[in-house]
Image (cartoon, helix red, strand yellow):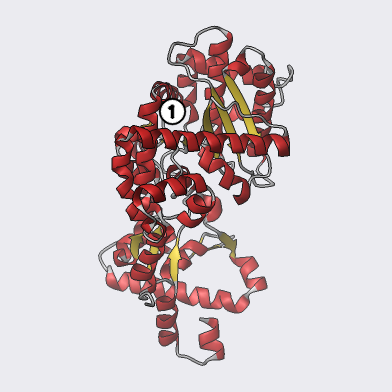
Amino acid sequence: MRILVDEEKVGWDDAWEITVRSCGYTNHTVLPEALETWPERLFAYLLPRHLQIIQEIDRRFLIQVKERFPDRHWKNDKIFIITGQGERQVQMARLAIVGSHTVNGVSELHSDILKKNLFNDFYVISPEKFRNITNGITPRRWLMQANPGLSMLINEAIGDGWKKDAEELKKLEPMAEDSAFRQRFSEIKKQNKNSLSGYLYKTNGLFLPPDFLLDCQVKRLHEYKRQLLNILHIITLYNRIIEGRTDEFFVPRTVLFAGKAAPGYFICKLIIKLIHNIAVVVNADPVVREKLQVVFVPNYGVTIAQKIMPAAELSEQISTAGYEASGTGNMKFMLNGALTIGTLDGANVEIREEVGEENFFLFGLKTEEIIKMRSSYDPLKYYKKNKELKQAVDQISAGYFSEGDSSLFQPIVSILMKNDHFFVLADYDSYIKCQEKVNMAYKDKEYWNKMAILNVARSGKFSSDRAIREYAEKIWNIKPVP
């Protein structure tokens, strides 16, 4: 608007039409820290002309809304671009909505949350703006480049048309019933596990037992992604092994973490410390390490991800329902034949729809259940009624994993017990029971490999080719060049 009005001398109305038609807003998260707001005072100091334009956009928008909806009493603080009394704030997400011709989320669930909750007033005003485009990943990098063994097997079975049209992976579905194909698929997975193990041993001195289930949570560290829930499961397994309480369905597993925390995110950096401390205790015990190992891969990035994804067998997508916009790690694991344990969050919902509920390990509260529970949720109730959960939390609190230093991890214990904003304790029991279903499925290797092959076969929807095509059709209004 500044360039068009001030420099090109275009009238306001024409400049605004050009701007709105040019801009589209893709929202990537519902987390408040990503929905930027800036003090009007700071804006005025740094960008005085921009602020004048934003104030005028805000003024005209409110006039239009009141003209279109004369009988509706809007709460102005819900639709103002500049909000507050005293220290007023410029709401950047609202500016993006008002100044764009489309607004989209990046999974079906996420887009519904934008419409029903986060931006509901703006959806009521302009429902035609809102749409969904689910994220995608490129099979060229995440299968052809990352997993050449599986790529060659797929080419032999169905040809290479899937490289340009990932929906052709559906042709693999009958191969899930072919025992010879399942055997070759299993051998490739084992080779990838050995390759990852060799790489981690050479670079970091980390060892992955080749016959253990490889259980991976690979993503940014954030409380809503609930690495803490995974940690509580590890401690529960540790206690069961120490106390001789494992049953015939118990499966030895390596739990692999990778990811980084934001530099100022104290709790998540402390969670990384807790994972390392637990790994020391678990991996040093001669009895436990025959059944359980914990690994944290340092300096996570795309290069190491291309080694982890093909080797993984279980994909941990365990965020609190309603917080993950989409996720793409879940798609990369699926494409490489890992099965998902997860909540109905982000693209997990669509992954489960594609693979079939029988090929997905589902647990946990749903988004609407969390919304209803939030005002009355008491984590202490769950802590007191579940002995294994209480034992795990008490061990962290007492310094069991910090050489007797009971103060080190108290900030984590305090969050779990007093301010469990992401419902870790509420979902613990469901998660533990679901992990037991994972064990039972993994015991039957033929059944597991069948499910894994179907995950690969039904991953075509999550190609970035489809996502980009939908952006072209629904937002950019452009056609492909022949």
Circle 1 sits in a helix, a strand or a loop, which is it? helix
**Quarter of the rendering containing residue 120:** bottom left
The residue nearer to you, when weighing 456 against 67, is 456
Relative height, residue 53 to residue 427 (above, below)? below
> Can residue 138 be seen by looking at this rendering?
no
Q: Nearer the viewer, residue 76 or 378?
A: 378
The residue tagged 1 is 427
Q: Is residue 435 above or below residue 318?
A: above
Residue 151, percent from left and from top: 46, 49
For residue 435, above or below residue 225? above
- Residue 111 image point, x, y percent: 37, 54
Which residue is situated farthest in the left direction here? 71
- Horizontal relation, residue 364 to residue 255: left or right: left
Q: Residue at x 42, y 21 (%)?
A: 443
What residue is rendered at 39% in x and 21% in y? 440
Q: Nearer the viewer, residue 103 or 232?
A: 232
Q: Position of residue 267 (x, y in %)?
A: 64, 37
In the picture, measured across the screen, residue 287 lies left or right of residue 372, that is right
Give the residue furthest to the top.
244
- Residue at the image position 63 percent from the left and 66 percent from the top: 41
Q: Residue 437: name its quadrant.
A: top left
Image coords of residue 173 (percent x, y): 30, 43
Report if residue 305 is visible in the image: yes
Quarter of the image with the C terminus is bottom left
Instruction: Please tell me in which quadrant of the rendered image residue 467 appears.
Output: bottom left
Amino acid bearing label 1:
Asp
Q: Residues within 10 Å of mark 1 (few under 14, many from 20)?
A: some
Q: At x 38% / y 25%, what residue is drawn?
A: 441
